[in-house]
Image (cartoon, rainbow, N blue to C red):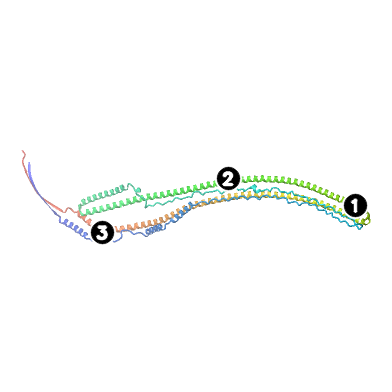
Amino acid sequence: MSFGKSNQSSSQTMDPQIKGALLDVFNRGRQLSYMPYNPYQAATVAPMSPFQQQGMQATVDAANAGLGRGEMQDAINASRGVAQYQPGQLRGMDVRQQGPIDAVDAGSAAGMQRASAMRLGTNFTPGTASVGTINTSINAGDVSASPISTAYGVDPARINQAQALGQFKTGITQPNISAGQAVQEDRVNAGSFANTNIDPYMSKYQTGVIDAALGDIERQRKIQQNQNKASAVAGGAFGGDRQAILEGETNRAALEQSARTAAQLRQSGFESAARLAEADLARQTDAARANQQAALQADLANQATGLDASKTAGALGLQAQTSRAQLGLQDRQQELQRRTTNAAQANEMNRANLNARMQEQQLRQRALMANQDAGLQAQLANQQTALAEGQAANQGRLQTQALGAQASRANQDAGLQAQQLGAQQARANQQADLQASLANQQNRRLYGFQNQDAALQAQLANQRTALDQARLDQARRIQNQDASFQRQLAQQNLGLQGAAQRLAGARQLAGLGQDMRGLQFADAAALQGVGDTQRQFAQQLLDDQYRRFQEAQNYPFRMFDVLRSGAGMLPNPTMTSSRGRNTSLGLPVG
């Protein structure tokens, strides 16, 4: 067993040479700290290039000018005009009713002249014989024929074809063809990005991506800090200013990289969400346009179908009305033919009755003439008897006056014979006049009937001609009406085709306007892209200048760091000296 005690002491001193070198480094750092701040006077941000300014100005000008809006508005107006297009109403020509045909007036037989026998004047005054006074005045009775009357008036039935035809009306009315319901277009409103909520389009993994990126940067920063600490420990500068400056620069670079990375990731996420939102807006606009086009085509198809149905119904109605009108006209024609036949039969019966009456009248006139002839002969016989009696009464006187009366009697006999001859001649003349009058009456009646029959036949022929002409006129009017319908239908079809062409032109005009607007903005974007490229190069030049300025500014500090590094590689300037005394006492162990 042993006991002991130790007494040790140590002292530290610095190496003068190393101390001088460290003081030199310290003085150099003090001088650097006294350097004034030297700001960077040059620009650090590149200005906008001329092409960039032109592109942005072109974008502003295109937006203010409203390129494509005029074409789009024209297309909208054209589409609205096409939507409001209404085909013209089909107007049928009025088929006027045929006016009533003039009534057939068969006329009446002219009143026949009354045959009147001539009055036979037999007044004879014989001469007076000088021998004695012998009154030989013979007053013969006046012989007068009874007047022959022809009071049988011919009055045939008047044929009124206006009553036969009546007031015939075709009954054809104008078909009512409707253009159908007006086509209304659907308004397509362009979506606005400003009113769009882009939150649903943002990536739900954005925060995780940003956190992961920032975590990587933070991990790299810590690794770098550990390497800096290791280097500082290896260089003997642990806890010194150089280590602090190096850690500060490392932290600054890490923070800048973190900020830049986060900003870029958020900007990329926003741009991706904006593109998705714009794609949805474009698809919504395309769908609205497709729906508008489909609705417009459906409305046009429905309108065309309604118009075709209306035209078909109108054509069928017109055909039915035309058929009914033709049937009615045929019925009227048959009725007219029947009545005309009845009128002709009645006329033949009247003519037969008239001939019978004329024969009866001729027989009566012949009997009357025979009676008149017998009366005249009786009157003559009476006159002769009266004359014979006067002669017998005056025979004595005549014998006594024979000598004086022979000449007078001879004269009287001659006068009587002359008177008898005159009476016979007058009677013959009267008979001839009566026969001539009867012949003239018969001729006038016959010619009157023939003229009346010819007039009736002419009027019937004229009526048939007028009726045929009315049929032709009505057929021509119906054909003209059909042609008018066809022409109006063709005009409506041309109007619809023109409306479709205007609608297609409006769509093409809208598309060209949008293409022109897109080209204008594309040109502006191209100019702006060239300007962006120029600005990036200019920014790179400015960044290089700023980097050189920073290098120039940091060069003394870098040299100072080199000097500090060199000072760090110096051996430990501290010299340690130790002194000690140990006392040990050993005891034996039993």
Res 403 → quadrant: bottom right
Q: Are marks 1 and 2 in contact (CB under 8 Å)?
A: no
* Viewer-nearest of discs 1 and 2: 1
Q: Which residue is mark 3?
A: 553
Residue 366: % across, % down: 80, 47
Q: Looking at the image, can residue 68 be seen?
A: no
Q: Secondary structure at mark 2?
A: helix
Residue 124: % across, % down: 86, 55
Residue 298: % across, % down: 47, 47
Hey, what amino acid is under mark 3?
Answer: Gln
Residue 12: % across, % down: 13, 53
Picture disc at residue 42: none
Q: Nearer the viewer, residue 395 or 315?
A: 395
**Mark 1 and mark 2: Cα distance apart in space:** 106 Å
Q: Which residue is mark 2?
A: 320
Q: Residues within 10 Å of mark 1 (few under 14, many from 20)?
A: few
The residue under the point 15% across, 53% down is 574
Q: Nearer the viewer, residue 495 or 451?
A: 451
N-terminal of the pair, mark 2 or mark 3, is: 2
Hey, what amino acid is under mark 2?
Answer: Ala
Q: Are marks 3 and 1 in contact (CB under 8 Å)?
A: no
Question: Left of 323 or right of it: where is 362?
Answer: right
Residue 136, placed above or below residue 328: below
Picture disc at residue 393: 1
Q: Looking at the image, can residue 180 be seen?
A: yes
